[in-house]
Amino acid sequence: MKEDLRHRILNSKKRILQIAYDCQKSVHLGGAMSIIDVLSVLYLKHLKYDFKNPTWELRDRFILSKGHCAVALYAVLVECGIVKQSEMDSFMSNDSAFCVHPVMNVNLGIEASTGSLGQGVGLAVGIAKAAKIKQQDFHIYTLIGDGESNEGSVWEVAMFAAHNKLDNLTIILDKNSCQSDGFSFSVLDMGDMARKWESFGFYVEQINGHNIEQIDKALAKKNPQNMPRIIISESIKGNGISFMENKPEWHHNRLTKQFFELALQELEVQK
C-alpha cells in the first residue's frame, strides 16, 4: 500500500510538470510541488468522498485557499479519476474549466473559486459552521500558505473557528517559507506559527510535509472535541527539483524544454 501510494504521488508530480510544460505559460510550480505530497495523501487515503458522485451532500470538502497552486489540485483530481487526463489539455485556455486559480465546479471536484488569498479559508469555516447548524456529519479541510497568513482575514477566521468550537475543521498550513516577493521571514516575519495558532484556540500539529508516514498519521487523527485543528506542514518550495528548491523565483515561472526534461529526470531518480 505504501509503495503504491508513493507511485501515485510520483505520477501526480510528473503530471504537474507535464501540464505546466504543455501550456507554455508561467505556472505556480514551486508551491504546487510543496503541497503535492500532503494533498495526495489526503485525497488518496483520508477524504470521505465518492469519486463517482462528487455532489454527494455528506462528502468531506477540501478547499484550496492557496488557490494559485491549483495545478497540484488538478493533478490529484486526475489521479483520483474525477477528471480525465485529456481535460488537462485545456489548462489556462479560454473557456477552460481548469484555470490558473480554481473556478468552482463541484462535478469536477472543485469545491470553491479561490485565489484571492485569505478568502478560501473563510469560506471553509463558513461551511464548517453551517454543517454544525444542520447537524451534518462531514469534515472540512482547507490548505493555506504561510505567505497567505500575512492576510488579516486568516486571523479573523481563526478566532471565529475557535469561538464556535468547529471540530469539523482542519486547516493545513503549507509552510514553505517562500512567497512571491522573497523569503517569508524577510517579507513579514510571522514568528512562531505553532504558538500563534495555539493561542487562538487551535489544536496544533507540526509535520514534515514531504514525509508520507507523518502526513498519513496526522490526517488519520480525529480532532479533539470542540477544537478546530491546524496541521503545520513544514515543506520545501519546489520540492524534489534541484533548480526549484527554496527559490522564490519559482513561485511563478515557465518550464523550458531543458528544465522540463531535467525535472523529470530528477523525479525518476527518487523512485
Image (cartoon, rainbow, N blue to C red):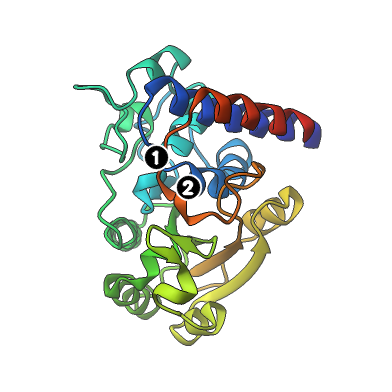
Residue 92, compared with residue 114, is above or below; it is: above
Q: Give, as a three-letter code, the residue at label 1.
A: Ala
Which residue: 28% across, 32% down? Answer: 105
CA neighbours of label 1 inside 10 A, class few (<14), some (14 to 19), many (20+)? many
Measured in 3D between alpha carbons, the distance from the residue under mark 1 to the one under mark 2, in whole angstroms, is 15 Å
| Dot 1 or dot 2, earlier in sequence | 1
Q: Give, as a three-letter code, the residue at label 2.
A: Trp
Compared across the picture, whether 190 is left or right of 158 comes to: right
Residue 62, compared with residue 230, is above or below; it is: above
Quadrant housing the C terminus: top right
Q: Which residue is mark 1?
A: 70
Compared across the picture, whether 233 is left or right of 21 comes to: right
Residue lying at the far left in this picture: please name it. Answer: 95
Which residue: 43% across, 20% down? Answer: 22
Residue 210 visible, this orientation:
yes
Circle 2 SS class: helix
Quadrant housing the N terminus: top right
- Residue 156 x %, y %: 29, 76
- Residue 257 x %, y %: 52, 22
- Residue 232 x %, y %: 57, 66
- Residue 164 x %, y %: 35, 75
Q: Which residue is mark 2?
A: 250
